[in-house]
């Protein structure tokens, strides 16, 4: 039976993913499998923002071994020191980085039970103004590196018959956002990747969840150089997103989680009647 406070909305479980037994206070993964004694989580983008908040959230849950990826060595070391995690520095724009991160993670802990892919970059402005280098960076960090990292880590999860993958998407990938064409495309592709992989993972004991937040108050917007342009959305805190990731890992499997929950509605309207959605978006922003 799922926990009493687990959400029951059927829209959050449109894939028939296998239930993994857990309570709100227990790790999903049992102890004693492989080198590490407790469950092992690899978090990308852990040097700041959502990734750092996820690390902090799971550091407060007993038993977890945290492997923390980031590009900024100084900030990553600070998060690792605060959470007791192991720092794995790498630049995800490097095509070879995914294999190196996976090898370092498995070499350090013996396995990876949970992958939280939280690293992300963005660029905002007219598509005709985006530099080729920015296109390559967004597609590399937000899409290609995630796909490659899953490819390297998934076999050992399937071999053990259990594991969880949590991908950080965006509402921009569900409905598209003006002046964020490449970012929206990368996040849309990530969502389709999660959907497709969910079918392949049926019966393996491994599940995949896509978390789709709206605006999140992180250094993401500062780094890209422009503030958010999506009207009507109150910024979430990284901690709110981290709580959703915690639920995705610790409670019954869910194919997707929208933050805030009402964002599910525009995503469904966009999917069912895209022309109506576009007209509403043009009128109300």
Image (cartoon, rainbow, N blue to C red):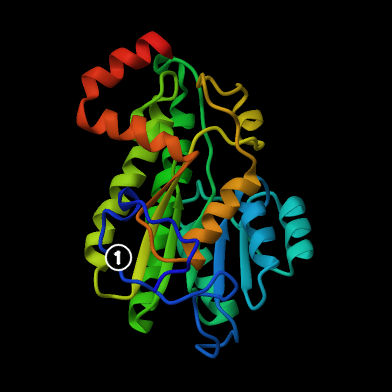
199 lies left or right of 246: left
The residue shown at (42%, 34%) is 263
- Residue 15 at what x, y percent from top left? 26, 58
Residue lying furthest front in this view? Answer: 4
Image quarter where the N terminus lies is bottom left
Q: Is residue 156 above or below residue 4?
A: below
Residue with the mark numbered 1: 17
Q: Secondary structure at mark 1?
A: loop
The residue shown at (52%, 21%) is 232
- Residue 117 at what x, y percent from top left? 49, 55
- Residue 200 at what x, y percent from top left? 23, 64
Q: Quadrant of residue 44?
A: bottom right
Q: Is residue 185 above or below residue 180?
A: below
The residue shown at (43%, 35%) is 262
Query: Alpha-carbon neighbours of circle 1 within 10 Å: few (<14), some, or many (≥20)?
Result: many
The residue shown at (64%, 78%) is 63
């Amino acid at each position: 039976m799922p926990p009493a406070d687990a959400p029951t909305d059927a829209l959050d479980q449109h894939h028939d993913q296998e239930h993994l037994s857990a309570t709100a206070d227990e790790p999903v993964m049992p102890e004693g499998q492989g080198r590490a004694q407790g469950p092992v989580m690899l978090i990308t983008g852990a040097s700041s923002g959502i990734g750092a908040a996820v690390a902090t959230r799971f550091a407060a849950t007993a038993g977890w071994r945290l492997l923390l990826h980031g590009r900024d060595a100084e900030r990553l070391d600070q998060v690792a020191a605060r959470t007791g995690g192991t720092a794995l520095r790498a630049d995800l724009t490097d095509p070879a980085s995914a294999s190196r991160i996976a090898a370092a993670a498995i070499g350090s802990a013996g396995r990876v039970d949970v992958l939280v892919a939280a690293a992300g970059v963005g660029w905002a402005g007219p598509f005709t103004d985006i530099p080729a280098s920015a296109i390559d960076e967004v597609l590399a960090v937000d899409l290609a590196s995630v796909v490659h990292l899953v490819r390297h880590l998934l076999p050992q999860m399937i071999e053990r018959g259990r594991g969880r993958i949590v991908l950080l998407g965006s509402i921009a990938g569900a409905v598209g956002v003006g002046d964020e064409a490449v970012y929206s495309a990368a996040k849309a592709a990530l969502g389709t990747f999660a959907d497709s992989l969910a079918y392949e993972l049926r019966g393996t004991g491994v599940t995949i969840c896509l978390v789709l937040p709206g605006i999140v108050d992180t250094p993401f917007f500062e780094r890209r150089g422009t503030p958010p342009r999506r009207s009507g959305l109150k910024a979430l805190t990284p901690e709110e997103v981290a709580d959703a990731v915690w639920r995705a890992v610790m409670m019954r499997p869910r194919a997707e989680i929208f933050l805030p929950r009402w964002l599910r509605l525009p995503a469904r309207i966009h999917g069912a009647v895209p022309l109506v959605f576009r007209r509403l978006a043009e009128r109300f922003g």
